[in-house]
Each structure stands twice: as C-alpha cells, then as structure tokens.
Amino acid sequence: MKKNFLRFAFLHYSYVINIIHIIIFILPPILRVPFWNIILGNYGKRVFIDSNVYFRYPSTIHIGNDVSINRGCEFFSSWHDKQQTKISIGNNVRLGPAIRFFAAGHEMNDINLADNSASIYVKDNVWIGGDSTILQGVTIGEGAIIAAGSVVAKSVEPYTVVGGVPAKKIKDRIIKKYNNPNL
C-alpha cells in the first residue's frame, strides 16, 4: 500500500513540476524571477536563468549571487534521503548550455539498484563549459574551470582546469589581475 502511494505521489509530482516549468518558460525573463524566488531553495541577486532550464526538486537547489545559467541546463537532486541532498551553486559562477547535475543515482552493488544520492557543491568563481555532466558527491573547488563536454565524477581542486571523460586535471589556473576601468 505504502509503495503504491509513493509511486502515485512521485508520478503526480513529476506532472505538476513539468506544468510549472512550462508556465515559467513561456514568461519573459523578467517575470520568471518571482517564480524562481518561490520554488528554489535559495535564489541570489543578479542571477540569470535562461530558457529551458529544468530543476528537479527545486527546493533543494541553492543558487548564489552573480550566477549565469545558460539554456538547457538540468539539475536533478533527490528526495530519497533524509539528509536532503542538495545542489549548491556559489557566487560568480558561469554555466554553459546543456550542463547536467546528477545528485541522485542508484547503488550499483545492490541487485535492486536502490536509490542513493550525495550533494553537489560548486564553489565561487567557477566556469563550467557546455554539455558537461557533474555527478553526485562532487565538489568543484573555488576558481576551477571545467572544459566543455566533460564528465566530472570526482571532486575538483580549487583553481585547476579539468576536462575529458572522466575529467582529469589539465593544468592549474593562473589568475592575472587586470586594471580595467570598465569593470
């Protein structure tokens, strides 16, 4: 009985959240902001979320200040654990198009493929190139850059550039100070 109820609730949640996303995406960007403020766990200042961005369990998604999320990004958190798995995006983060965050998955050593999950943390000043995939339990350190098309299965050290499938360190990121009066 309980299993049937959970399945029923899950299927209806999926339906409702998809309807909400359709409504949000037909609105102009300026009118989307109030919706994001309501449904996301945290929505910082000066955040740009492009069209066709999908949030599964949006109350578990936390977005900092000065964040740009390009079109087609997908955030899959989890409702299966009691610790509230979350996806946390820091400040001054740039996400290219079609990036996927998977904080939920399945136990490969369980014949029934039981659900599991682990939070994903993207620290400040990070750039993730388009069509990358970030897997559960990963922390992307401050100032890191993820090359386009990468699959990040392990945490990334601060101020490093990683890329590939699976993502590996390419080099250190050297920050140069520019004296630009327009910034």
Image: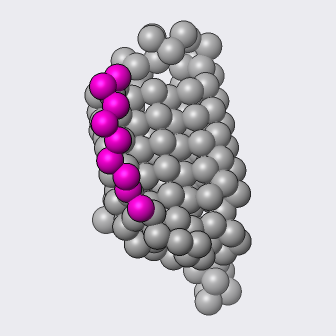
Q: Furthest-front residue in view?
A: 179
Q: Is residue 172 left or right of residue 177?
A: right
Residue 19 position (above or below residue 30):
below
Visible in this render: residue 95? yes
Q: Is residue 178 magenta?
A: yes
Q: Nearer the viewer, residue 13 or 22?
A: 22
Visible in this render: residue 81? no
The residue segment tinted magenta is 174-182
Q: Nearer the viewer, residue 62 or 82?
A: 62
Q: Nearer the viewer, residue 106 or 53?
A: 53
Q: Is residue 94 left or right of residue 123?
A: right
Percent position of residue 97, x then y: 64, 40
Point 52% across, 65% down: residue: 161
Percent position of residue 80, x then y: 45, 63
Which quadrant: the N terminus? bottom right
Point 58% across, 34% down: residue: 70
Percent position of residue 34, x then y: 37, 18
Residue 179 position (above or below residue 145):
above
Majority SS type along the magenta span? loop
Question: Quarter-wise, where is residue 58 in the image?
Answer: top left
